[in-house]
Image (tube, rainbow, N blue to C red):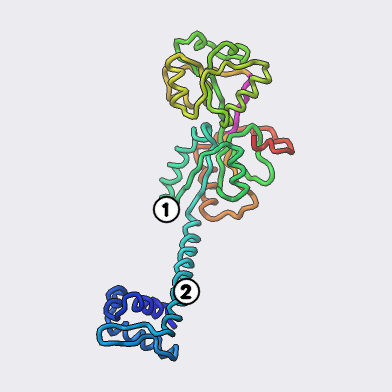
Amino acid sequence: MKLTQIEYFIAVCQCGSFTGAAEKCHISQPGISKAMQELEQECGVALFQRNRNNIQVTPQGRILLEHAQQFENHYQNLCQVVKNLAHSRTLLRIGVATMRGNTIFPKLHGAFLKEHPRTTIETIEETTNVLYELLDRQEIDFALCVTNHMPEEPYHHLLLRKSYLKLFVRKDHPLASRTSLSLKELKDVPLVMFSDHFDQTTYIKRMFAVSEVQPRIVHQTSQVFTILEYIRSEAAAGFLTEEIASQEPDLAAIPITEFHPAFITLVWNKNVRLHPAMEEFIRFVKQSRFIQPLEPPQKAEPSSSAKK
């Protein structure tokens, strides 16, 4: 029994005639008739009752049709599995840390696709903790994280660059001329921040608590645009990454003495076997301009601090 015979048989049953099946399968009517005769000979029973104007499926034919349709469904599923296997070799699933991961990823994304146009990259933007969970569940291949510690077991990583948080104000703001500021000096300054689910906000609030300062937060948002508008209108000062300074010539970016640099890090699960697209992405990142020479951050504590 051949696959084409099964396809033709199903078509004849659906169309109710050899002529209709021939048109549907793009084959001649004699070709369909011959294939059905051979199938009946192989089965040893009549599958059709032939009338002058149409054909009817016999009880034995209906039994075969039921199994043939099941087989066709399984075959189509198998074809999709094979297609997905082939596609997975050119598919990368990358998670990007909200905000600071996005200061580097768009350029990295574009540069890689320019060199590898047949590779598909699916992206998701989440907090660093969520990205580690996705890595653990193997729902993403890589995570572009922001961390103060080197990831440990069970992860491999590449350190890409440092990233500093700075206080942004308008250039005519009274604080704009300062070369640095402490958090204690900001206790009366109205501030705009990202929402609490952002890793960045968690870090800032923790540092304020360590400094025993209650920040004067006038607004929280999930949008960079909103923070910039608050700063431009002098309604508040805001914390943003230093990379934004080059894009905002009318704003001043002031270092905060208590803030430590974070490290933008490419992380993947060492227990996962790398497919060719993953290997190529790692090679590309290692050889690209996106890596800056860095001293590695301190090792994480044995707890989950590598994910903070």
Pick the residue in front: 40 or 54: 54
Viewer-nearest residue: 280 or 239: 239
Q: Position of residue 299 (x, y in %)?
A: 70, 35
Q: Distance of mark 1 from mark 2, alpha carbons?
A: 33 Å
Q: Position of residue 182 (x, y in %)?
A: 61, 14
Q: Nearer the viewer, mark 1 or mark 2?
A: 2
Relative to 8, does residue 303 appear above or below in the rendering?
above
Highlighted range, magenta: 258-263
| Residue at 42% from the left image edge and 15% from the top image edge | 233
Please identify the quadrant where the N terminus is shown: bottom left
Q: Whole-percent x and y of residue 198?
A: 56, 31
- Sequence-first tag of 1 and 2: 2
What residue is drawn where x is 68% and y is 20%? 210
Q: Is residue 14 left or right of residue 269?
A: left
- At label 2, the amino acid type is Phe
Q: Which of 47/226 is in front?
A: 47
Q: Which residue is mark 2?
A: 71
Which picture quadrant has residue 204? top right
Q: Say which quadrant the C terminus sits in.
A: top right
- The answer to whether residue 68 is above or below residue 252 is below
